[in-house]
Amino acid sequence: MEQILANGVYLGSQYAMIALGLTLIFALMNVLNFAHGQMYVIGGFVTYTFYGQWGVPFVLALVMSCVTLAILGALIERFLFAPVIKGSAREESTMLLAAGIAFFLDAVILLVFGEKQRGVPKIVDGVFNWDFRIIMPYDRILICVLAILSIVTFIGLMQYTKTGRALRALAQDRTAAQLMGVNVDRYSMIGFALGAMLAGLVGGLLVTITGVNLGMGGPTSIKAFMMVMIGGAGVISGAIWGGIILGFMEAIGLALLYQYGDITYLLIFVSLMIFLAIRPQGLMGKPWG
Amino acid sequence: MQRRSLMKAALTAVTMTAFGATAAFAENPVLKIGFVGVTSGPAAAWGISNQRSMETRAAWINETGGYTIGDTTYNIEIVSFDDQKDPKRAIAGMEKMAQEGIHYVVGPNVDDGAAAVRPVAESNGIMYFPYAFPKELYQAPASNAVLGMVANYQSGPAIYKYLMENEGVKTVAFIAANESDPLSQRDGGVEAAKALGLEVVSSNVTYQVDTTDFTPVLTPVMRAQPDLLVLSGVSPANAPQLIRSARELGFQGLISTETAQDAGVLAEGAGDLANGFISVGGASTPELASPMMNEFVQRYTDMFGEYNDESNTKVYALEYILETLKADPSAIEDVDAFQATMDTFEAPNPYMNGDAKLRYVGMSSFGQKRQVAVPLVVNVYQDGAFETLFVAEVD
């Protein structure tokens, strides 16, 4: 049981981080960013290049991942999403654009970083073993702590800074925020950059454990969408809860149902369908959107 | 006047050069060989190593004047199609090959894709070389598929037997991704292990293809404490993570797989924790690789920046196609002639030292010669490189 709880906390914290950026972008711009997983992969490859290839200190490599993705996110918002949102009232236009960007980034990743699985040296050696009740490598514990700290910092940023307040205002009511003097274009770009930066941060953190390859983008996006749907689309706390719930469901399923084959995700999907039929807005979303 | 003459001479030289170049290009007719396989998504490494092996060899042949079949010397062109590991796309890819008049195709890489393209290949006179293991693809009445590597039901028993005799292995656990290839390889492995008298202590644990962290997945397997952990059909992307998680969970036993792996990927993903990992390879270890194999590796590296050890097994398919066509030039347009030639075909294996031969095998497994005889080289990973554990032959 202790191992299940430890696995649940560990998986939940990394999933919550993955979902945060996606839900932030959705909250601000009503855009389902299908390229979120690809941004996560690029974050992993940037850390791999700086830390694994060039020997730059891990923290600096992580910063480079964040900066690269923030710039990429800002450029994508400024030159792709902003014109499409202004020029088209149909929501599917942005969805198609996001899917197109996902395919494009996949191709770029293949060209720049190749097809192979990549990994970096461990940032901490050793394994925590509590009498075989909990076995957890120290690097996973460290990444879990860093993920939780990042989430707390992000919440603090959103709650207590001028930028965070502007972004929350934008998420609540775009028109009202504009009338109150919020520069909507500027903060949309900042919000998208922040969402992409979160993807880069989690990609950089997790490359130390999971490695990275070009095929991870699509499945990561799907998992992130599941978490957002569980927690409620566009709600920051919902994304965190969605990640934690998915992490615990996965940990419990893998520990208790392994004798029946790979039915964990089957049950998770069935539960999600039933849950959404009862509460389509998710745990913390509002029925009106 | 002198200036005008100079310009005339320059113009003449340019014209002659252009004609010369055109003549050189036009000199050799082009022989198109197809590739239909996965070059995108999580399993991209499998198909890309196929495609790049073919492109490297084709460029090498073309650079050295072409490939002579009968009285004609051909330049080789590789026509590739990414099936995205989707059987529907694989069918579309094989149809494209048929439309282009291509009769010889390497791929697909996975079981369902290879099964899906069979009707298209047989009705359009295409011989194809899948990297997929279902026996019905190669047994009569199937006629046009040729297994491009050693199957797990051939390598698995050889590895288990070796480890029983040399390492005292008595118990074994299997873990596989939840998709058709790894699951069928797991089932074949379980059957082979039981037939050899091994005790199978765990074989139910599977994982999602997109799993990135295997610690929770492996925890139940580790409780069984097997002597040998078999990673059935594991992709090169997942192998290092599985090894790393198993070792971090305290697993002390042996770990093996029946798929080809890449030493660089293992080094980056698992480091020293991968030492002792057993996998199936080709003729790349120093004692086996011929000068031609070494040149192939060098050319591949020059062309694509980095070699992929999976290509040690994938270098062979194109060579088999070309050598068989050389043995019977009429087979270029006639796959029946190709099939007839396969029964008696034999040529020196240029990629291995010694007197190894290129020939078709498969009588034991399929009842007809529908497999290329690549050497069954079982490797063990040690400190960033593969070492040969043992070499065997398949038929």
Image: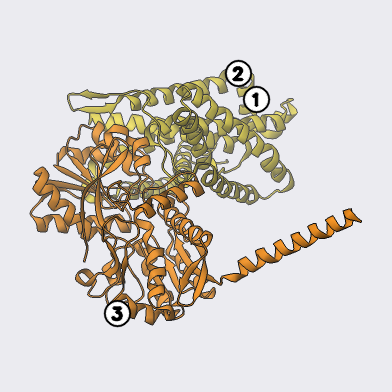
Quadrant of the rendering where the N terminus of chain B is positioned: bottom right
| Residue B265 pos. (x, y %) | 37, 41
Q: Colour of chain B?
A: orange
Q: Amino acid at mark 2?
A: Thr
Residue furthest front in the image? B2
Of marks 3 and 2, the one in the foreground: 3
Res B313 → quadrant: bottom left
Chain assignment, label 2:
A
Q: Amino acid at mark 1?
A: Ala
Mark 1 lies on a secondary structure that is helix
Query: Going 45% across and 63% down the picture, which residue do you hit?
Result: B36
Rendering colour (chain A): yellow
SS for dot 2 = loop
Residue positioned 61% across, 66% down in the render: B25
Residue beneath disc 3: B141
Q: Mark 3 and mark 2: span between their CA atoms? A: 72 Å
**In percent of the image, x 14 and y 50: which residue is there?**
B162
Secondary element at image label 3 = loop
- Residue A277 in view of the camera: yes
Where is mark 2, residue-wise?
A: A161
Tell me the number on the disc at residue A166.
1
